[in-house]
Structure formats: C-alpha cells, structure tokens
Amino acid sequence: AQSVTQLGSHVSVSEGALVLLRCNYSSSVPPYLFWYVQYPNQGLQLLLKYTSAATLVKGINGFEAEFKKSETSFHLTKPSAHMSDAAEYFCAVSDPGDSNYQLIWGAGTKLIIKP
Amino acid sequence: ETGVTQSPTHLIKTRGQQVTLRCSSQSGHNTVSWYQQALGQGPQFIFQYYREEENGRGNFPPRFSGLQFPNYSSELNVNALELDDSALYLCASSLLRGYMNTEAFFGQGTRLTVV
C-alpha cells in the first residue's frame, strides 16, 4: 500500500534561514504529489502540486518542491523563512493504483520559526 | 478563498447522540471527501462521494455515513457518538478525472467535541 513519510514531526529554523521539509512516498508509479499548509484551528491550504509536468514546482508564499523519482522524494523548500510561515505542513499523494481515489497523507511537520 | 464552506464551525455533543455536518463544495468540482483530524495528527480519510454515491471508504465504522446531493454538497452523519470522535472534521472537494483526483480544496473544518 502507498505510504507517505515526513521526516521530522517538528522542524525549527531561524527567521531568514532556509526551510527544508522532507517527504518521501512509496509508490513505484509516480503519483500526483501535494503539499498543504495548516494554520492553527484552520483547514488545509494547497501550497503546490506535482502532476507529472515540470519536476521543480513553485507554489505560493515563496515555497517550491522538487520531484525526484530516483529518490521517491518531494521535499519542500523556501530560501528564507518568515515568521508567518510557522504552521503545520502536510505532504500528500494521489495514487493511480488506489481504487479509493483518496489522498494519502503524511503525519505532518510542524515548522517553528525562531526570531 | 477556496469556495468550500462547512457548517457549523464548532459543535458540542453528548456521547451517544447523533450529529450531521454539512459541506458546500467548490464550483466545478464533482467529488467530496471527508477527513477526520484528531488533535496533533494528520487527516484520516473517512470516505469520498462521487456523483452522489460513495466511491471510497477508509477504516471507519458504519456509524459514519454520508450523502452527496445533486449540487455536489454533502453531509457527514455520525451516529452513537463516542468520546474518541472528538476531532476536526474536514471536507474537501476535488475533480475526479479518470483514476486521478485533482488537488483537493478544503473547508475550514468543523470542530466536534463529544462530552
């Protein structure tokens, strides 16, 4: 079964530093890949998605992610962290082999920004 | 703004009661999915509705049921509420094309507390 692994339940970076949030998936067939952000007590907002076009995907708020098939990874990056980036980030995949058509989610990474 | 709206935003129920949560999907989308997100965890897929029929279900008991209406809005019903049902319930709408779901757009969620 497809699975998504997000390395690190909490990631802490200083304001202005590079943000790197890791996501690996298990499918042998490249799925659709997504990153979502969730602010406290709110729903999930789509940051960016990969749907088999360009492997480097740019999203909102200065975030981008690179699909690497050889590493089955889809890590999220931002060159310079801002205090407003503090939130929880979820990686999700849509697996073409899944008859439920569901999104499969990682456990989430809470991003902490230090002043 | 995603266009997905959920009601109510907060709800307190007593163990054993029944609850109905509502979701209005984004214009142009044909699929509604429901997720349960317990505190500090990622979303867990409950089920998905496409063309008014359930077309995918996660590991939730039958007391979790749903409906999708011709206008693609949806309801989640939970019978015989248990304390562990306390969570944020998220509705997401998407466009199902072939065997792949496009990105899901989420509502702000309904916070259910069972006492």
Image: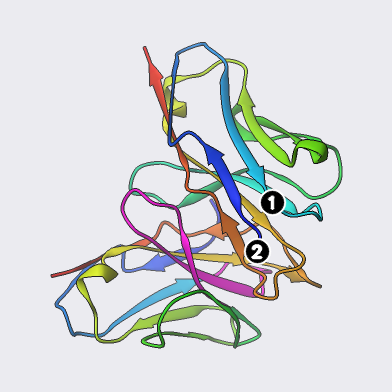
Q: Identity of the amino acid at label 1?
A: Ser
Q: Identity of the amino acid at label 2?
A: Ala
Q: Is the residue A76 above or below the residue A19 in the image?
A: below
Q: Is residue B81 left or right of residue A92?
A: left
Magenta region, residue range:
B25-48
> Is residue A30 or residue B7 the one in the foreground?
A30
Q: Which residue is located at x 67 percent, y 48 percent?
A: A25
Q: Which residue is located at x 66 percent, y 54 percent?
A: A93
Residue tagged 2: A1
Q: Is the residue B109 above or below the residue B66 in the image?
A: above
Total count of labels:
2
Question: Which image quadrant for residue B54?
Answer: bottom right
Magenta stretch encompasses residue B1: no
Mark 1 and mark 2 lie on one chain; the one further toward the N terminus is: 2
Which label sits on residue A52? none
Residue tagged 1: A26
Q: Are marks 1 and 2 in contact (CB under 8 Å)?
A: yes
